[in-house]
Amino acid sequence: MKQYRTIIAVATAGTLLIALFVGVLLTSAPQDGPPPALLLANPDLTYDPVSAGEQMPAGYRQLLARDQIAPIYNPEFTTPSEVDWPDQMLVIGVAGANTSKVYPITPLNQREMVIDSLEGIPILVTW
Amino acid sequence: MVHRRELNGEEIVLGNQGALWGSAMTWWDHETGSIWSQPIGEAIAGPLKGQQLELLPSTLTTWEAWRTAHPDTLALDIDGWRTAFDLSDMTIVVDLGTDSVAYDIPALRAVGVVNDQVAGVDIAVVIDPDDDARWAVFSRLLDDALADFELTVDGLLDKTTGSVFDPFLGVGRSGPLADQTLDKLPAFTSFPEDYPTFFPEGRTWPPTD
């Protein structure tokens, strides 16, 4: 009986080790694939310091509603060979250890914000 | 600018607050609704007031220089956006979400400035009659008044207060509001034929009706 218990304990420990190993593999894998979909809040249902009557710093000017200029919440990417951009076009570039991303200024002029990630690090690109 | 969207190791999602502070954009975060200032990356109101996001290194350069240094770069897919154009037959598009207007550049050039309203927001579109590449879109909301602009040899004249501003930077030059700077709004150029594709409900200026 004791023998069986030992076998079960060893088997359980083995399974745990394998699970742990797979877990480490999964979490340490490069996260360059599409990031998980963002959980977006409804701007109208989210606390707003202005409408709540908080004291705003001098010079604060509310011109538009939240997200009236819609940020790019789910950016898509392509390769340099797929685009036909002018050489002298201004871009914002970010580089990680293995991956780099580039955002032309032109769309940022209109959308102002890109909610993105680079090698698993959540980033916000603004112009 | 590129900021790290993390606070104490937790990812946060940011949106556009639609307000300016110190002439720079502000964000709201989806978790707490706090208001953040872009240049300092810091929450200026709300539950997270005083918290700061880490600024990450980024490069502002030309496409050619970036592509040469990073041949394997991922490029933001801006399919549908044209980036090379002859401005003379284009339009300036002001898109404020629920309403958008495409301003015909040759017609704009003839008047210099248009005082208008888009999505209920009072705006002015200004263009240099001698240089189509120099244009700007401003809010007409001043401290205590609504501006009514005219382009003069001295600059952008607000007929309501008698103040004059730089027509493209918005910096005050003379008059009672000389110490103020107009708030800039985002806008972009588009081909007239592309406009209905992206903005089927969009209006045009001058109105076609």
Image (spheres, rainbow, N blue to C red):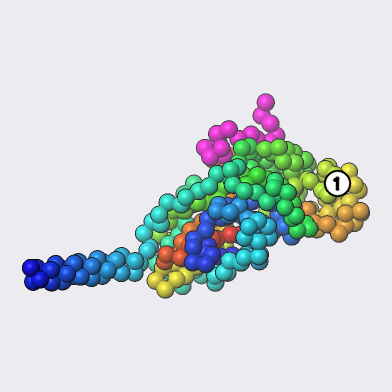
Horizontal side, residue B131 vs residue B155: left or right: left
Q: Quadrant of the C terminus of chain A?
A: bottom right
Badge 1 amino acid:
Asp
The chain holding disc 1 is B
Pick the residue in front: B198 or B155.
B198
Pick the residue in front: B113 or A66.
A66
Please say whether residue B171 is visible from this viewpoint.
Answer: yes
Give the quadrant of residue B37: bottom right
Residue at 74%, 38% (x, y): give it. B116
Give the quadrant of residue B47: bottom right
Residue at 61%, 66% (x, y): give it. B52
> Which residue is situated farthest in the front direction here?
A1
Residue B122: % across, % down: 75, 41
Please say whether residue B61 is visible from this viewpoint.
Answer: no
Pick the residue in front: B206 or B181.
B181
Q: Quadrant of the N terminus of chain A?
A: bottom left
Residue at 55%, 53% (x, y): give it. B31
Q: Is residue A98 above or below residue B10?
A: below
Number of numbered discs on residues: 1
Horizontal side, residue A24 vs residue A111: left or right: left
Residue A40 is covered by the magenta coloring: no
SS label for mark 1 = loop
Horizontal side, residue A22 vs residue A116: left or right: left
Residue at 62%, 65% (x, y): give it. B51
Horizontal side, residue A35 vs residue B163: left or right: left
Residue A80: % across, % down: 42, 61
Residue B103: % across, % down: 67, 40
Counting other residues with Cα less than 10 Å from the Cα at mark 1, is it few (<14), some (14-19), or many (20 or more)?
A: few
- Chain part drawn in magenta: B195-209
Residue under numbered circle 1: B144
